[in-house]
Image (cartoon, grey):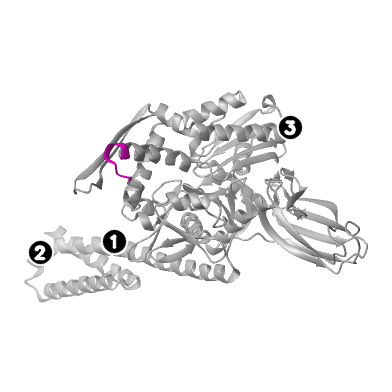
Amino acid sequence: MEKVIGIDLGTTNSCVAIVENGTPVVIPNRGGYKTTPSMVAVTEAGKRLVGHIAKRQAITNAENTVYAAKRLIGRKWNSPQVKNAVATSSYRIVEGPHNDVRIVLRDKEFSVPEISAMVLQEMKVIAEDYLGESVSKAVVTVPAYFNDNQRQATKDAGEIAGLDVIRIINEPTAAALSYGFGRNIEKTVAVYDFGGGTFDISILEIGAHGVFKVIATAGDTFLGGEDIDARIIDWLVSGFKEEHNIDLRQDRMALQRLKDAAEKAKCELSSVRETEVNLPFIISSGRNEALHLQRTLTRQTLEELAEDLVERTVDICKQTLEDAKLGKDEIEEVVLVGGMTRMPKIQSAVQAFFEKEPNKGVHPDEVVALGAAIQGAALVDDKQEMVLLDVTPHALGIMTFGSYFEELIPQNTTVPTHRTKIFTTSRDNQTAVKILVMQGESQRAEENELLGEFILTGLRRAPKGQVEIEVTFEINADGIVSVRAKDLETGLEQSIQVTATSGLTREEIKTMMDNAKDDLVDRRTSEEFEAAKQEAEKLIAEIEKLFPQVQQIVASSDFGRDAIEKARAIVDKARSAIERRDAAAVKEQIEGLTRTHRMFKGVVAKT
């Protein structure tokens, strides 16, 4: 059976899992870690770095290191969230050619799906190293509250990374799959998912025969641990400004150090009452004197800084319960997901709202990837008895006369689904009607997301309101929206399959895929060379150490001198191959070096 990996493409960290012999497991990376930082950097030499290696050099290469790219994926340049990121990020964000977002690293522009693709490619490599075979299919998770453009951008990122994303599923739904997998339970569950960049709440009914039915979902795609970090940074920056009258935000390296320290302090305060933020030599004053930042942050101060953010999550939970038409007493279990749920303040807020102790039985950082792997296995295995019924997170409809939004498919409708509504023309003798397909919750059309548009032409001339047009919306299991408009009198029909846009053209995606492939080949070759180089250098060092002794023992015979010369030649050849960075040649020399090392050890052992 074909292997399908499950990937949790997170804001702060990403995780990859697979189902092996019926058991979902998280795949560790080369360092043995089960999660990998969702960070990408480009070095001065133009080399791409992903994950832990990118995070380690972030402070010294702040302007060319990207974090939290997920918060920008699928967004329009003029959105308030993008403006916020432009003002607070240590890397450069610019407007792309399609009103999209681009990130500048070493004077080269990258699209956000391209940056995310580098992280997904890293997950693919981690899985392939573990399995010892290539992987092409994946289920990738997204925040439940992502709109269609954000979902499409994530799919594009998978394609650029060389993955066939067979399904995009919602993070809280994936967590529920993992929580309920193989447990044969019947429960109404709330999944409270507070991660690094996004917040989601989903309410599901888990049935005994593997049926997972989402009743309602809601969230905020720009609310997460990043915002709590930002509050700590503000607190540190304002304290430093009061003391020294210097704004640390003007220095990119200082800002990256603050970000690092804020995240570390926040994590520490989940287990201790206070922590010291100590950043020596943070900046130089005008008089060239080095200044240090040293402040004690208590858990109480952190909770005060984050109070309104936590409150926002509770308000969203309240609204979602109302949407689900359920009382708190009908929720049998509250499952905590996402790194932020380790924060005691969040746990107590959830407990106070739902009036029950939340379940901490799932691993907050791994459960989403495990759920994605479970869904992946179910999609390729006919024997898997699992039914997943998800909902559309946003209402779908069309723009009507006066720029109003007319909803056809309400938020939280189980998919697949279809709905039909009849509209009439708004002007006398109108022969064409433009259908603008939109997604969102606002009654004002311009406040919602435009997904696509088409024109129904050839309508008969008649006074306004007399031509009836039937509009049908349909969403399939993969979340693909198609819209049809039909003149009821003439039967004239026009339709559109709404393919959301990530802001990239097919040509751009193709070019990015080729670049990603080249980069992977370069990386694989580079890794191969590094491994061979390490082995060769270790053998050369051992041989060099034994040379004086061996020379002393065998120098008296012609045969011995010949052996020494041959050994020198092998070492020189290996050194030359290392200098040329020729992996194949280095590998070739390893055999000769191993024989020489064995021979030298034998000569020394005999004396």
Which class describes the residues within 10 Å of circle 1: few (<14), some (14-19), or many (20+)? Answer: few
Q: Position of residue 521 (x, y in %)?
A: 44, 68
SS for tag 2? helix
Residue nearest the viewer, comparing 256 with 339: 256
Q: Which mark is residue 325?
A: 3
SS for tag 1? helix
- The quarter in which the N terminus is drawn is bottom right
Give me the residue at 47% from left, 51% from top: 85
Residue range in magenta is 241-247
Q: Is residue 290 left or right of residue 230?
A: left
Q: For the residue marked with disc 1, what is the amino acid?
A: Gln
Task: First in sequence, mark 2 or 3: give its number.
Answer: 3
Q: Position of residue 487 (x, y in %)?
A: 88, 62
Which class describes the residues within 10 Å of circle 2: few (<14), some (14-19), or many (20+)? Answer: few
Q: Which mark is residue 548?
A: 2
Examine the structure image and report whether residue 165 is included in the region drawn in magenta: no
Q: Are marks 2 and 1 in contact (CB under 8 Å)?
A: no
Q: For the residue marked with disc 3, what is the amino acid?
A: Lys
SS for tag 3? loop
Q: For the residue marked with disc 2, what is the amino acid?
A: Pro
Q: Is residue 211 left or right of residue 78?
A: right
Question: Does the image show residue 185?
Answer: no
